[in-house]
Amino acid sequence: MKIDQVPQSEGNNQSVSDLSNNPREASLSWDSDYLKLIEYYQNAKFGKCMELLEEMELQYPDRSELVKVRSDLEVKLSLKSMESRNRREKSRERTKTTLNMSVFAILGTLLVLIAFFFSYNYLFSIDTVQREAEKEATLISLYEQAAQLLLVGKPEPAIEILNTIKAIDPNYETLPELTSQAEQLLVLEDKYQTAMQLVEEDDVEEALAIFRQIDAEMPGLWGVKQQISSIETSLQITQYLEDGSLAYQEENWDQVIASYEAALSLDPKLDDLLLKEQLFQGYLHKIINLLQVSDTTTADIELAEQYYRKAVALFPQSKEFASERENLQEVSGDLLEYKFTQTAKTLLADKAQTSSTIAKAVSYLKKAANIQPNNSALLMDIENAEYYQIGFQNFIEMNWPQVILNLSKAVAVDSNYASGNAKVLLYEAYYALGKQYYAAGFYQDAISQLEQAEILIWEDNNNLMRLFQVQVLLGDNFGKLGDYKNATSYYQYALNAIDAPGKLGNHPELVTLLNEVVYWVAVENYKTAFETLQEVLADKSIFYTSVEVEIEDGVCLAFFASENLSTIEAITEANNLTKTMVITFGRVLTVPVIVE
């Protein structure tokens, strides 16, 4: 053991080497335990050093070396303990700080985790909702596509879409319903194909039954209704053709026409030569039946004319059908033309004629001319009828100059045109125009018109009222001109024509005046004679007899007056009528007449 390795205590400069001079002390110094003690001390193994020191103190009590060692060792241990405590305190502080930081870190982490958790859940829920919404939208779109395909009768592509829906959501609520519809549609599609095959094989009745079944189960598919309608039309046409053929054999011409026309109405393009030939014969016989009777009505004539036109239209203008057209013309054309002409003349002669019946008469004449386009007499009849038609309209409008202009043309060709109706209108027009001129002071013009009316009267002098009125008005005009001789002459003629003295039994004063007139004429005092006759004619109604007669709606007053031997002027005054030439509403009228 080295002496310089012995530890020294504070305040004592004696080293361990100094103990070698003392044998007892020298034995301690050379003790191996002591040397180990020094080694432990030097190596700072203070714990082992203390244990060994305690053993040696028992062996070497009160040894100063050991006391010093203990003292130094205790200082070292104390320092070490303090250092250890310091380290522990620092360690505890560090641990506490670390723990605090850890707690905060853990809390922060937890907060972050919680925030992340809720954020994740929120975002996840949004994403889930979006995915569900997208899924639902996809399913709805697919559903609509499938439903539309089923609606238009396409089950196979619809089933493909339904399989897609099933892959997305096997429990989709409408999937079973659509699947059932698709399966049902597949069955109906097979039936449809079967029916179409039957149509190609001309088994239309069996096909019709299948089509009706399909339409009953699911209406509106594959044009089934059109197929049904087409087959039904075809069957109906076949039935009409059979009925028409049977009717032709039985010479039932009404049924022939009805059946074949019904077939053509269903199929206007029906090109059946036998049908056309038999229908042509039906028209021909029916025209003859309608027109050969004596009491043919206008309705019969119009029907015959329709049949004639239909018969002409059956065959095109070609040499192949020339004989049919010639036969139609010879057998029925002439007969129809004659009936048209006669009916037109009857309408023009009708005393109850109206603008519409006159127009119909003109139309009939034109139809007759269409049948006989080279008949010059017919063309002349049409021209006169048109003059009459225009003149009649002028009369209703009270355009007297135009009435005279147009009706004079018709009367120039036939003085008794329209069975005298033209002359009736002309007389009233001349008389009305003469009154207008008289009222305006154009007396010479009035006389010219009244003289034309007078000429018409001489041709038909049965109507004393017309004769009386026109003669009196002529006398008035001559009186205005100062020609009292002619004025007196017209007055006297008017009174003599109606046997005035015989009608004045209740008016002796007027008879006296008439006798005075004879005197004034004899002495050629025509002015006094004229003035005396005006007194006699002051109230012309004393010469009239009145009767009650019913008139129908729309009747021309001129014809009504003529038929009842009166005039428009007399009837208008007796009934206080407004100035009109046509009675709009039927009624009973007072009709003044002059009885012979």
Image (cartoon, grey):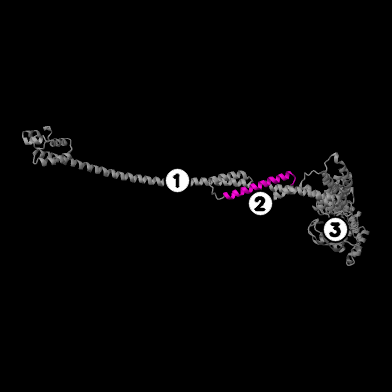
- Check disc 2 and give the amino acid type: Glu
Mark seen at residue 561:
3
Count of numbered labels shown in the rendering: 3
- Check disc 3 and give the amino acid type: Ala
Question: Which picture quadrant has residue 464?
Answer: bottom right
Does 521 sit left or right of 230 as displayed?
A: right
Q: Which residues are magenta?
A: 175-203
Q: CA distance from mark 3 to mark 1?
A: 107 Å
Does 500 sit left or right of 71 as displayed?
A: right
- Check disc 1 and give the amino acid type: Phe
Q: Is residue 542 visible to the viewer in this orientation of the structure?
A: yes
**Callout 1: few (<14), some (14-19), or many (20+) C-alpha neighbours within 10 Å?**
few
Question: Which picture quadrant has residue 63?
Answer: top left
Residue on which disc 1 sits: 124
Q: Nearer the viewer, residue 288 or 235?
A: 235
Q: Nearer the viewer, residue 100 or 78?
A: 78
User: In x, y percent, where is residue 398?
Assistant: 80, 53
Q: CA distance from mark 2 to mark 3?
A: 74 Å
Residue at point 22% right, 41% down? 87
Q: Which element carries disc 1, helix, strand or loop?
A: helix
| Sooner in the amino-acid sequence: mark 2 or mark 3 | 2
The quadrant of the rendering that contains the N terminus is: top left
Q: Are marks 2 and 3 in contact (CB under 8 Å)?
A: no
Question: Which picture quadrant has residue 459?
Answer: bottom right
Asked whether 185 falls inside the magenta stretch, the response is yes
The quadrant of the rendering that contains the C terminus is: bottom right
